[in-house]
Image (cartoon, grey):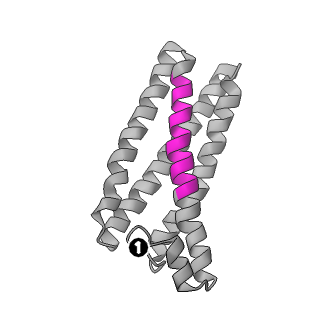
Amino acid sequence: MEQQNSFDTLNKSLIWTTAVFALTGFHHYYGSLVYGTPWRAHIVLIGGATLLLCIFLVWIYRRYRKKLWLNSYLVIASIMFGLIIGLFEGFYNHTIKDILYFSGLNVATWRSLFPPPAYEVPDNILFETTGILQLLIGLVQLYFLHRVYKTYKQ
């Protein structure tokens, strides 16, 4: 029974990791179309390849029960999807940017922190909402990765 619960936790972490990728893939591809910045779509390929690696690592861990594979999954998933996408992309690139912009911060100051072409003026609600949601989904994903770590650390 305990082993089944640990697999449930591992499954949930992989589901939330996939959710982070799906959201950021949509967000970046949509942004590339709306803002005419095809370089934004790179995350679909890079994130997709990283997600496939995560799926493979979970599969190989389940097959051989070697902690190396589980730990590799935890490190890669937490860095790529939790920290880079969830915290940096969702928190800094969108949440902080939107708070500062809509708080009325001087445009010159705001633009010095968020220069074009990497950053857009928050004028598209779908783009900004999916950007902020990356933070929320990323935090849930990090929570489940932490649960996996705590479950398997012995």
Q: In terms of image quadrants, where is residue 99?
A: bottom right
- Tell me the magenta residue range: 69-88
Q: Nearer the viewer, residue 92 or 7?
A: 92
Specify whether residue 89 is painted magenta.
Answer: no
Q: Is residue 109 above or below residue 33?
A: below
Circle 1: residue type: Pro
Relative image position of residue 97 (x, y in whole percent): 56, 71
Residue indicated by mark 1: 116
Which residue lies at the image location 52% right of the left edge and 39% below the top edge?
Answer: 77
At 58% across and 86% down in the image, what residue appears?
106
**Residue 11 pos. (x, y %):** 55, 34
Q: Is residue 105 left or right of residue 53?
A: right
Q: How far from the left and from the top, in percent, is residue 78?
A: 56, 40
Q: Residue at x 64, y 31 (%)?
A: 148
Residue 29's place in the image compared with 117, above or below, is: above
Disc 1 packing (10 Å; few <14; some 14–19; many ≥20): few
* Placement of the C terminus among the 4 image quadrants: top right
The prevailing secondary structure element of the residues shown in magenta is helix
Q: Secondary structure at mark 1?
A: loop
Q: Give 112 or 50, whichever is nearer the viewer.
A: 112
Residue 128 in the image: above or below residue 138: below
